Amino acid sequence: MKQKLLAKTIICHYDEIGLKGKNRKFFEDKLRDNIKQKLDENFPDSAARVKRISGRIIVNLAKPADENEIKEVLKNIFGIAYFAFAVGCEQEMGAIKKTALEILSEKEFGTFRISAQRSKKEFPLTSQEINAEVGEYVLENFGEKAEGGVRVNLKNPDANCFIEIVDSFAFLYLEKTRGAGGLPVGISGKVVVLLSGGIDSPVAAYYILKRGASAVFLHFHSIPFTSRASLEKTKELAGILSKFQPETKLFLAPFSEIQKEIMKKSPPKLRVILYRRFMMRIAERVAEREKALAIVTGESLGQVASQTLENISAIEKCSELPILRPVIGFDKKEIIAKAEEIGTYDVSVLPHEDCCSLFVPKRPETKAKIKEVEKAEEELDIENLVAEAIKNLEAE
Ligand code: ATP
Ligand code: MG
């Protein structure tokens, strides 16, 4: 029978742990949609057809695209455990054997194995039988009798030929590429990430996206006290983080009026804590608008004066929403390594004036007492200040 090669095909696998009942379909549909969205965005001419088949997502590109470029896109899509560029053929042993030979002949190898996986149990051969028959065929063609003959090595082969029997096709490939793992963005609900322009908050955003939350970003700036540098940096950071989720929104909140009031009326040592409490209140309003269920920060325990347990506690008491801190237990070094890996580090270290380092005393409070903080806030028109910031919120 004449072998029929299909268009460029990619098989995406996910981990099935915990995927039961309704959750499973929700997970798979979201992953499929996220893959389709990113491929269409990055390869508009390839017209990706993305289907969910037997515990996998199968992508068919009408017009083949560069594998390395596709890798760069797929490796940032959470929920994919691994993916492979495959050749599809008819689900018939003659075609499978020929395709195996074809893809193996593109590679230099001395030892090989065949690793078949049969999702369609009606296929007449078991996985073991497929391995044996295809292996035999490869040996007949490339084996010891051939020049520079090859051998089977099950433990540590130079070439591993994977065969997946799925639906009405067989898919063959030699290489698996590790995916980002995690859960498809969007299945865990939405969060508001406080994005500062520093190193830590983009990494916190990465980790919360990895667990399937979609994120809107919120940045506070102190223009005209500071330049536009923090805005430009944060826009760039949000752009980099957008490769991990289908849609990205950045809100910019003016903070200088609030800082002026705090400066005028509050004890200097409490300033940072008061700034932070205002940020939480504004974040809560944004969350309400955006139907987000939590606030995320890049705090790491003990890293700076405002991140002691006492201060974290005084800061979070003004928010009804859970405040999540994905990097709370990370050392700075670990956060930096991750920031480098995800591509945010170089932007984060560009110089900018941080709104929270403005008007802050040399020795800020490290053990804030909530009573003192609340007393200081009695002097401030909280409602009005928050409403004004929300009114002047800009969306990017
Ligand atoms: P980062 O590197 O994320 O700036 P940091 O170590 O500098 O963190 P802080 O400046 O104390 O720590 O900020 C703690 C967290 O508060 C940040 O990770 C961020 O989530 C939030 N935050 C601080 N400043 C801002 C800002 N201007 N806009 C939005 N969020 C902010
Ligand atoms: Mg900071």
Image: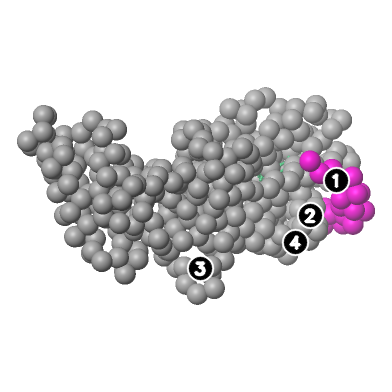
Which is closer to the viewer, label 1 or label 4?
Answer: 4
Q: Secondary structure at mark 1?
A: loop
Q: Main secondary structure of the magenta part?
A: helix
Point out the stretch of residues depicted in magenta: 373-396
258 vs 211, nearest the viewer: 211
Q: Quadrant of the C terminus?
A: top right
Q: How many marks?
A: 4
From mark 3 to mark 4, how far is it between C-alphas? 24 Å
Disc 2 marks a residue whose amino acid type is: Val
How crowded pointer 2 is (Cα within 10 Å; few <14, some 14-19, many 20+) is rated as: many
How crowded pointer 4 is (Cα within 10 Å; few <14, some 14-19, many 20+) is rated as: few
From mark 2 to mark 3, how far is it between C-alphas? 31 Å
From mark 1 to mark 2, how far is it between C-alphas? 9 Å
Q: Earlier in the sequence, mark 4 or mark 2?
A: 2
Q: Earlier in the sequence, mark 3 or mark 1?
A: 3
How crowded pointer 3 is (Cα within 10 Å; few <14, some 14-19, many 20+) is rated as: some
Q: Position of residue 372 (x, y in %)?
A: 76, 56
Q: Residue at x 62, y 31 (%)?
A: 348
Q: Secondary structure at mark 2?
A: helix
Q: Where does label 1 land, which residue?
A: 393
- Whether residue 171 sits left or right of residue 263 in the image: it is left
